[in-house]
Amino acid sequence: MRGASRIVAATLLLQDGTKFTGRGFGASGTSIGEVVFHTGMTGYQEILTDPSYKGQIITMTYPHIGNYGFNKEDYESGNPHIEALIVKEACLFPHNHRSSENIDSFLKKFGIIGLEDIDTRALTRHIREKGSMKGIVSNTEKNLNTLKKLLDSHPSIEKIDLVDKVTVKKPYNWKQKADSQWYYNSITDSGKKTYTIIAYDFGIKQNILKLMTSMNFKIKVVPAVTSYEMILDINPDGIFLSNGPGDPEKIIYAIKNIKKLIKKFPVFGICLGHQILALALGGSTYKLKFGHHGSNHPVKNLQTEKIEITSQNHNFAVDSKSVEKRGFEISHINLNDNTVEGMQHKDFPLISVQYHPEASPGPHDSLNLFKKFYTLVKENT
């Protein structure tokens, strides 16, 4: 962190005992989470404010983070959700006409701990070899035994309902459209008629809502615990299942409700919503070794034979054989590891993808999925 007014030693201790020591920035304190690495070169503000990252300590593999600052427009939610941020070098002097503050002041404002000047390449390789694991970051506690005790007593993400920590508390209507300039003016209404969509908030990103509104959907966002009966009272034209953090098998209340709703309405799921849809139909999920976190993941669309470069953030995946037995066709696969990236039901109007087609941050290869959902709703109402 060039030009820092003070140098504060900070430590990362991993669950297997591996230690990294560097300099602290941002807030003071101690934070625990699952340590993962993100391979995106840009989009750090969207990453920090994406509720899907709740419970995670993010390591950015690109070495220089913060160079274009932070602004008032690029939030994916009202505040950051990560547990801590690890970078090779934090830039205190950003250069961008939209920038209103630097990375240090942003993290301080929201109480997020930063750690820099460690070998992020070594940390990334360690996670790739050993798998994602719990870690503790502190710039106030120096005693390793104390840090180890705190880390051991903290539950893993497989044992926590993280959705409950990020979902909205009350329903609300969303009306803002996407700013077309960021999508190269490629956004057009899918059709003349407006359809009402219930969006289950498991940790929803604002750009998903903006894009669906731009595609001529009328959006009502509801809490993750919203019951089947309450949805029937609203009687929407379709259901959207959002992205979100953590283990999908812990969201039992949502799985039970979606299991009933899939027989009544067209459904589109993204990320955690994709996994919940699979579980609702009797499929299964499993945890990946180190997950997919980045904006450069190649996905093959099996229906078009085209390759899409996608933005992703998830630690769990859908088991292909389990959903194929439940009437799903696999529509997309990940070219890095052949995991399921999308599916479509043979008998019901149900589609879902594991990645983030709203491209915030990331490439715009998959925007057509929102139009596909519009067509699905139109054909089934």
Image: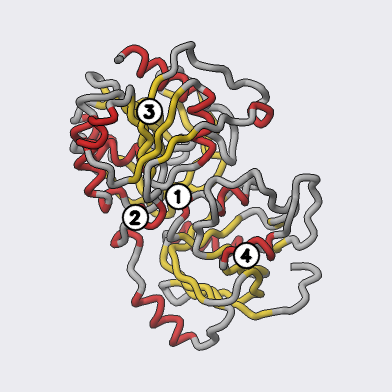
> Could you tell which of marks 2 and 3 lies nearer the N-terminus?
2
**The N terminus: image quadrant:** bottom right
Q: Label 4: state its secondary structure.
A: helix
Q: Amino acid at mark 4?
A: Lys
Q: Nearer the viewer, residue 322 or 91?
A: 91
Residue 234, how many percent across, how many down?
29, 30
Per the model, the C-alpha gap separating discs 2 and 3 is 22 Å
Q: Is residue 304 above or below residue 143?
A: above
> Could you tell which of marks 1 and 3 lies nearer the N-terminus?
1
Viewer-side label of 1, 3:
3
Q: Label 2: state its secondary structure.
A: helix
Q: Tell me, for residue 197, which label it has, or none.
A: 3
Per the model, the C-alpha gap separating discs 1 and 2 is 12 Å
> Could you tell which of marks 4 and 2 lies nearer the N-terminus?
4
**The C terminus: image quadrant:** top left
Dot 2 alpha-carbon crowd within 10 angstroms: few under 14, some 14 to 19, many 20 or more: some
Asked if disc 1 and disc 3 are in contact, CB closer than 8 Å, the reply is no
Q: Amino acid at mark 3?
A: Ile
Per the model, the C-alpha gap separating discs 1 and 3 is 21 Å
Numbered label tally: 4
Per the model, the C-alpha gap separating discs 4 and 2 is 23 Å
> Could you tell which of marks 1 and 4 lies nearer the N-terminus?
1
Per the model, the C-alpha gap separating discs 1 and 4 is 20 Å
Residue identifier under label 4: 109
